Amino acid sequence: MSERMAFIQACLDRKKRIVDICDAFGISEKTGHKQLKRFREEGIEGLEDRSHAGLTHPYRITPEVRARVIALRRRYPLYGAQMLRDWLIQHEPEVRWPAASSIGELLKRSNLIVRKRRQNRGNERKALNTGRTRALEPNMVWTADFKGEFRLKSGCGPYCYPLTVLDLHSRFLLGCTALKTTAVATTEQTFVRLFREYGLPCVLRTDNGVPFAQPNAIGRLGRLAFWWVRLGIRPEHITPATPSENGAHERFHKTLKAAATKPASPSLRSQQRRFDDFRTEYNTHRPHSSLPDHRPPGQFYTSSPRAYPTRLPPLVYPDTWAVRLVNSSGFIKWRNQEIFLSSNITGDYVGIVETEGDRFTISYGALELGHIDAESNRFTPEVRWTG
């Protein structure tokens, strides 16, 4: 301010040309004339600093928009800025909503968002392409998993084991069931209900945990997986200790945990009600960043045309194949010898056909189990889907 007054005083003294005075003070002649004009019109106040902001702010968030964003955030406290914007655009498209970054700043100023500490992930790398089945349409691939168990009644009650099933293409949450055990029978009952409601998928992808897999069994296939084979469903296990191969499902579990398990409900029934409410909101209202226009999964899912049969289809093989019954210990008889296959298919029939290379291929429906060497009668497990 004092330097500007000195400039004005030098101009008023008229001992030098204004262009020379401007040069002495290190300003342009245009700026000098502007300051002199302000002094003559407004006096000393005209020399004070002025804001360079525009007179109008066309992109400023209006009070109405601000109130709507804050209300929606309080309704859905787990929605981030982008998800809030997606929801608003889908449900109230007539309003010009601010960018996600602006909504994020609004949430911070309103103390509705907490900065998370960035975790040091070291040299973490993305999973390589493992050749898993691509979900090109609904019901091509379902993914299933048990979310980590937790105690009910705020940590002092019985355990709850949430079984979650997703359609990988549409991200539609087919089922989220609060179970008290991971037993095969209980899990199978849950899948029967889902199959009756939505039909059958082509592939069911799971991890290698109980009851989806049996580590020491042929192809890591347990009784549940062989039941799926009977239904024409291909079991697909991810590589052991590689949860990234089922990454979409793992990420979903984080959302489920934050939205519907903290704090835990007092009983399985009340916890199931929370899961049901979450499932409705997730499928019909919640925007999904991996789907077109970030629309909810329910807008992309349709039930499978393959209906769940009233009776389990029989295992049928060509007339040219040999058929053998798997006994109660998991063995079949072949050329006066017993060959062990699996105790999970006792009472069922397998088909045996001679192939090239002097060997016989054993199949369980559309699933090849392995080969018998014609000379040594030795069985080599080699599971492959042929359906």
Image (cartoon, rainbow, N blue to C red):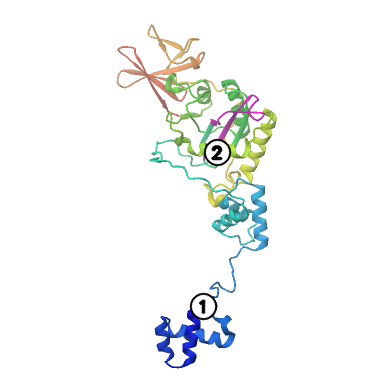
Q: Of the residues under marks 2 and 1, which one precedes in the sequence? A: 1
The image shows residue 384 at horizontal and vertical percentages of 41, 26
Between 326 and 258, the residue placed more toward the observer is 258
User: What is the span of residues highlighted in magenta in the rendered image?
Assistant: 145-168
Q: Which of 8 and 115 is in front in this view?
A: 8
* Image spot of residue 123 (x, y percent): 38, 40
**Which element carries disc 2, helix, strand or loop?**
helix
Query: Which residue sits at x=56%, y=88%?
Result: 40
Residue 53: within the magenta? no
For the residues marked 2 and 1, what is the alpha-carbon distance in whole angstroms? Answer: 58 Å
State if disc 1 and disc 2 touch (CB < 8 Å).
no
Residue 339's image quarter?
A: top left
SS label for mark 1? loop
Check the image and name the residue furthest to the top. Answer: 336
Looking at this view, is 2 or 83 the one in front?
Answer: 2
* Location of residue 66 in the rendering, given as x and y in whole percent from the top left corner: 65, 59
Q: Residue 331 carries which label?
A: none
Where in the figure is residue 112, as x and y percent of width and height? 62, 50
- For residue 215, above or below residue 6: above
Q: Nearer the viewer, residue 311 or 204?
A: 204
Determine which quarter of the picture holds residue 300.
Answer: top right
Quarter of the image with the C terminus is top left
Query: Label 1, on which residue?
Result: 1
What amino acid does circle 2 point to?
A: Lys
How busy is the neighbourhood of tag 1: few (under 14 within 10 Å), some, or many (20 plus)?
A: few
100 to 377, vertically: above or below: below
Q: Which of marks 2 and 1 is in front?
A: 1
Q: What residue type is labelled 1?
A: Met
**Magenta includes 146?**
yes
Residue named by callout 2? 254
